Structure formats: structure tokens, C-alpha cells
Amino acid sequence: MLFLQPPKQQMAKSIFTILLVAVSMLTGCRSEKAPTKPTISESEDSLTKVSLQLNWFPEAEHGGYYTAALYGYFEEEGLEVEILPGGPNSPVIQQLVSGQADFIVGNADQVLTSRAKESGAVALLAPLQNSPRCIMVHEESGIETLADLKSMTLGISAGRAFALYMQKHLPMEDIKIVGYPGNPSIFANDQNFGQQAYVFSEPFIAKTLGANPRTLMVSDIGYNPYTRLLIATQQRIASEPKLIEKIVRASQKGWIHYLKDATKTNEHIHSLNKEMGSAILAFGAKTLQSLCLPDELSEDQLGKMTLERWTQLRDQLIEIELIDDTVNPVDAFLPTN
């Protein structure tokens, strides 16, 4: 038996059915056109892309910057930083001024000498508070201080600020100066040969070559510029202050992390520079700890700079006639809050 609904109920049901179908159709159309979540590539496209030019081939001395990239500290600040390797005599200041690089890594004396030529270079962060520059001699030579250097051949870059300062303040009796050899191979085979070095690099290599090196720190005679600085132009600082804050903050995080745990970053550096093996990179990272965080500095002060240090360096560069007193140390660095 077929039971028929009353006409009003039947009409009401029909209207309800039509409305239900219509809603379903609208919902289906809306879901097809609804925006999807951004993909990783789309998120990456929103990052601000900048370049960081190194002063040398990738080594432990750049570890903090690579750590900031590797562990996402730059990305956390909305930055995509391309780290560009350098090499011998990399013209980092020229690359900065010409706009080939947005940021560079260099030394404090480079900042001041370039400002004498109106480069507008400004230091943002000083990861290495103490200079790693040293003179490497043989333990068997009997030379114990820089003042003892005499009657030998010395491989140094004679026109560099540290070399000029040494020649001004040390007897350098009967010293034959030749060009920096680039590696310790000559040193390892000549007991009467000394050379410039970075304390975290060449001494380690010299030992692997069978030599017994002694390192004499140039900072012991008072020449101690900040090194491996993060540097920008004063124009960029004025026009993009937020960008400056971000890259400084991320770089500082990277350096703090690297000094605590360099393992993963050192593996990455080795992949970029095969000459840097795990042993020398580990030695470098360990040596950097006291250079970056001397006893008077806490972790949160890493990279800080003082006007006193910059003024002292300015006066030293005037003394060796690389700049004159028109260079104002106040303008050479970004004060730390």
C-alpha cells in the first residue's frame, strides 16, 4: 500500500531537498577555490635575500656565520643569506662599496683604512674580540717573544698594518723579510724561517708536517684589532635598520651556537673546502673560544665593541701612517645596546 503525504508536507520536503542540494553545490565550489597553505618554496620566496662575502676560503673562522645559515637562525629573522667564499687578497671592501655584496667579513683595520678613502664601511658585530694573528717560529730557535726576533728569515705580508706596526715597535735585528708563503711547508723544512699565521690554522698544519711551532701573538705588543667583523655600509644602515638588526641578531646566535657545538657546521665547512679536515676544524673551533669570549665577556655580549678599542686602533694606524686624524672612530662601528 502506498501512503501519500499531505500536499503541504510534500511541498515542504521538496523545498528542503532543493535547498540542501544548492548548499552542497555551493560548498563544493567553495572548497575547490579555497586557498591552500603556502608551500615551502612560497615561504622561501618571502625571505629577504642578501649576500655575505667572506674574506677567505671557508674555515673555522667563519663558523658562526655558517651556523646561522645551517641551523635556520637567518631564516628565523626572515633572511636568506648567500655566503660567498673568498680567497687570497679578496677585495671585500671594494665588493661592499660597489654593491657586489650586501655584507662582508673583514677586520677592523680594514674598516678604518677604507673609511679614510670614504668607503662608508661600518662594523656591525665583532665575533673575534682578540686577534688570531701570530708569528710562528720553531721551538728549537730559542725565540720566546716577538722582541726576540732576529737573525732569521720572516715570511710576512710587509705592507699589511700588523707588519708595519711590528717593524715600528720591534728591533727586528738582522731580519730578512720575504713574502708570506701561504702555507707552512717552507717553515717545516727550515729551522731559521718564521712566518705570519693565524693561531687556529697554520700551527696545526705545521705540526702535521713534523715541525714544532711556537706561536707569538701580535696582540702581545698591543696591536689587537677586532677580526672577522660583520660589515655593512652606512647607507644600508640608514636605509634598512631592521635588516641590520636581524642579521646581527642571527649572526650572534650562530656564533654562540658554533662555540658550543661546532660538529655539524664543521662537516658543512669541510664539504665546501676539502683542505679543511675534521681535525683542523675541531682545533680551530676550540681555539676560537678564548678569542671570541675572553674572560671578561659573557655569552650575551659576544660581538660587542667599544669606542676605546676603536680609538686605540685609529691612533695606531695614524702612527704607522696608514690614515690621518680625519678618520673618526665613532663612525666606524655600530654601538652595542
Image (cartoon, rainbow, N blue to C red):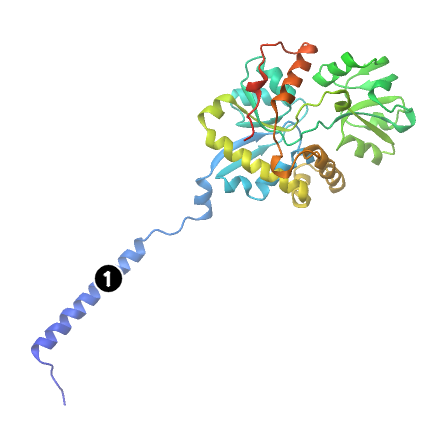
Q: In terms of image quadrants, where is residue 126?
A: top right
Q: Front-most of 263 and 256?
A: 256
Q: Front-most of 150 and 37?
A: 150
Q: In the displayed image of the protein, which residue is found farthest to the left? A: 7
**Residue 248 appears anywhere in the view:** yes
Query: In the image, what residue occupies the spot 53% across and 24% down?
Result: 100
Q: In terms of image quadrants, where is residue 141?
A: top right
- In the image, residue 96 lies at what x, y percent? 55, 23
- In the image, residue 315 lies at what x, y percent? 66, 14
Q: Front-most of 251 and 291?
A: 291
| Rendered view: 211 above or below 45 | above
On-image quarter of the C terminus: top right
Q: In terms of image quadrants, where is residue 190?
A: top right
| Rendered view: 131 above or below 262 | above
Q: Which residue is mark 1?
A: 25
Q: Is residue 235 left or right of residue 152?
A: left
Q: Is residue 161 left or right of residue 246?
A: right
| Kind of residue indicated by mark 1 | Met
On-image quarter of the N terminus: bottom left
Query: In the image, what residue occupies the spot 60% across and 22% down?
Result: 307
Query: In the image, what residue occupies the spot 66% across and 45% down?
Result: 264
Q: Residues within 10 Å of mark 1 (few under 14, many from 20)?
A: few
- In the image, residue 306 lies at what x, y percent? 61, 25
Q: In the displayed image of the protein, which residue is found farthest to the bottom? A: 1
Q: Front-most of 175 and 22?
A: 175
- In the image, residue 284 lies at what x, y percent? 73, 36
Q: Is residue 120 left or right of residue 209?
A: left
